[in-house]
Image (cartoon, grey):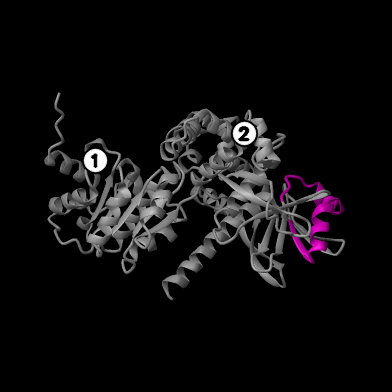
Amino acid sequence: MAFQSFAEEQVTDRIRFENPWWHSGKVEEYYGNMTPRLYLDLFEPLVANVLVRRAVILMGPRRVGKTVMLYHTIQHLLMEGHNPQKVAFLSIDTPIYNNIPLEQLFRLCTKTTGQIDAKGWFVFFDEIQYLKDWEVHLKSLVDSYPETRFVVSGSAAAALKLKSRESGAGRFTEFLLPPLTFNEYIHLLNLNALIRPSTFTWDGGITDFYDAVDIRKLNEHFLNYINFGGYPEVIFSEAVQSDPGRYIRSDIIDKVLLRDLPGLYGIKDVAELNSLFTAIAYNSGQEFSLESLSTSSGGVDKNTLKRYIEYLEAAFLVRTVKRTDNNVKHFRRSTQFKMYLTNPSLRSALFSPLHATDDHIGAMVETAVFSQWMHRDWIEPWYARWSKGEVDLICLDEKKFKPLWAVEIKWSNRYFEYPAELKSLISFCTTNQLQKAVVTTIDKQGVKEESGVQLTFVPASVYAYAVGRNTLIQKKQQLYIISNS
């Protein structure tokens, strides 16, 4: 039986359907009325700066809002006065586009609108992973049409990253859209009235910070963020929150573990990979070793485990954190490390949502705080552990290999009342000549001194919000410097 390909008229009809602004001049209200993610302020300038002749690759985990961000970027271009008939959006997972080269799709756009001149076009290809060898197609487009801006996105984050690095040197600019920060969660739900700007003294200067207007209400939302807050669609849907496993596990986790990663890396034993991820998710924030993982997984080879962990990190599901000790000696052959979910709500999808007093809530608060720091690609978080103690989060001067600051992440008010019990933190600060450290609490805030160390106590929810918000502020400052250099 011979199969017939779609007629050109059928393809162009679909292209017209996907680009209603060619006639209306605006994006559909469904997308236009959505509150943009705060990361749009970083992404949109990359697209708009046509002086840099590179394609932009929007990558990230599934369901974090990549397609919506593309529509918001298109909306911004239209509002700035760009010709609507020179802005095209094509979702490559549409069956009618099956195996059609990107250049042919682009030429159909120019033919359909009558805008034959390729200069000044903005072309968005969504779900690019559905086209085989997409990176080869995209590289050719960038070379052939230097005055056209091409933007692609896709859900198979690990595959996009791998193929982008292999084929796109000098031609592709990558942009990672991570799960929601707690700051973005507050922003999207229009809860900014729960937080007010504040400051505290740090390292001899005044640091921008924040206070909770209603800490009880903020903590309620922080717990909701831990359980459901990584994905924009989830935070707005009570139906999804009532059964997170059905949505997050099937649509996000399973597709990555059962389809994306096996297809990309040729993994044959999918059950083995799934078992490893489940163990990491349940014990997020705990210390692991290849030996312990091998034993708990029934004797899986250590080199295989290393590859699995690399794959899970490439898919933006987990993050490995390195260990140092009380004297901050670099473990050149450290056998122990911590692993965190990049998004705490992955755990509730696999098991069940947590309550404020559950046994695992402390580890998930720690995971939530670490997930905010993971957005800072210029800082590598560490933890310190030695025979008599541990400090949850430290930052090292990469040149001098000395600690710059330390944070103890607690979901308890006890240490605010009894700071002398923070023996490990105080010992670490004293040994490394740190005069100050931060300790998170449930709802207590203030400064106390213990054994010559100034301890700043901050509610964990406020601290997570501050890290996420200040991260975006610093990224915007970096973007401004680069754009004006």
Which residue: 54% across, 65% down? 474
Which residue: 20% across, 41% down? 14
Query: Is residue 217 visible to us here?
Result: no
Secondary structure of the residue carrying numbered label 2: helix
Q: Which mark is residue 279?
A: 2
Q: Earlier in the sequence, mark 1 or mark 2?
A: 1
Residue type pointed to by label 1: Asn
Badge 1 crowding class, 10 Å Cα cut-off, few under 14, some 14 to 19, many 20 or more, is: few
Between 436 and 219, the residue placed more toward the observer is: 436
x%, y% of residue 54?
Answer: 33, 62
x%, y% of residue 188?
Answer: 49, 49
Q: Is residue 159 left or right of residue 287?
A: left
Between 444 and 162, the residue placed more toward the observer is: 162
Q: Is residue 254 left or right of residue 224?
A: left
Secondary structure of the residue carrying numbered label 1: loop
Any magenta on residue 418? yes
Residue type pointed to by label 2: Ala
Magenta stretch?
A: 409-438
Any magenta on residue 234? no
Q: Quadrant of residue 471?
A: bottom right
In the picture as drawn, the residue positioned furthest to the bottom comes out as 485
x%, y% of residue 171?
Answer: 34, 61
In the picture as drawn, the residue positioned furthest to the top comes out as 1
Residue on which disc 1 sits: 99
